[in-house]
Image (tube, helix red, strand yellow):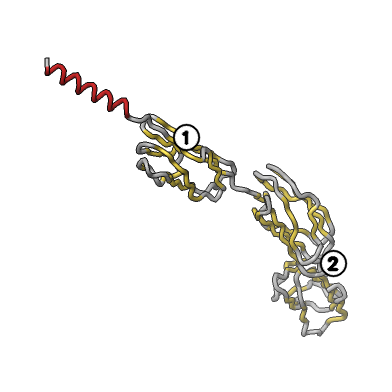
Amino acid sequence: MKKIIAISALWAIMLMSFSCKKAPSLTVSPATCEVTSDGGTVQLTVNANYPWSAESDADWVRVVTKSGAAEETVLNIVVSGNELPDGREANVTVTCESVMQTVKIVQRLKPMVIPVDGKEISFGCEAQVAEIEVNTNIDFEVEASSSDSWLKVLSTKGLRTAKVTLSLEENETFSLREATLKFTCDGAAVSEIYVKQAGRPQSFTVVHSLNSFKVPSLFGFGMTATVFWGDGSSEVYDNDLVHSYTTEGLYEVRVEATQASSVSMPDMVGVKKVDLTSF
């Protein structure tokens, strides 16, 4: 009988101990974290009355603090940079015995403005209105950065496949000029496009009576030119170009150039006339 009483007492003590154990509780904050496309470290606060553990369901969200004791309240996670044109979401689940809580990680898209025709666009010297096409995943603003006002942006916003309309004044100089289009989103730089406009063509003529004529020397950084020999033939300029004629007579050689800064013609034998008014 004493034995039965002792066993009953033991069971009573065990039942009392089980009934005295507190139910697990868990609170993780914030419930949602928004992260920029650059990624970075995010810190969550955990309040739990028993040891807890944490795991992520995405490889771009790494849980640094995988577990903690009841008194440990900091959960660190690292979010990788987003190189995609779309935003993305992941979940970090924290477990404390039978209680679970999920924190949503929301990462913004990477702002993109990608010019369809490349980041450098060239135009002729004439005044014109032109469109450039870009692929984008954001609402953007664009402005022209230049030392003068020859380039203006006529349209400033777009979404998805967008067109930006430009107004270019005529380039009345012989020099190439450049400007930069800066695309921004919420004041932050996203992309740049470099716009070039050619200078107006330079030309000069030489009238001669020679059977063989060497082209005058041209100088200038980035210079290009075409030589029209006066007998119906032409060639791309080269400093050593010499042209022979099949018949005698007067021939007008015309050279059309861009980016030329000077011309030299030391040998004037057989030369009847030189016109440099358009050079």
- Residue for point 72% across, 74% down: 220
- Residue for point 62% across, 48% down: 111
In the image, taking residue 144 as reference, residue 88 lies left or right, namely left
Instruction: Give residue 231's mark.
Output: none
Q: Quadrant of residue 175?
A: bottom right
Instruction: Give residue 172's mark.
Output: 2
Q: Is residue 127 visible?
A: yes
- Secondary structure beneath dot 2 equals loop
| Image x and y of residue 9, in percent | 20, 21
Q: Is residue 231 above or below residue 189?
A: below
Q: Closer to us: mark 2 or mark 1?
A: 1
- Secondary structure beneath dot 1 equals strand
- Residue for point 40% across, 34% down: 95
- Residue for point 67% across, 57% down: 192
| Image x and y of residue 151, in percent | 79, 59
Q: Quadrant of residue 217?
A: bottom right
| Image x and y of residue 179, in percent | 74, 62
Looking at the rendered image, the quarter that the N terminus falls into is top left
What residue is pinned by disc 1? Answer: 102
Looking at the rendered image, the quarter that the C terminus falls into is bottom right
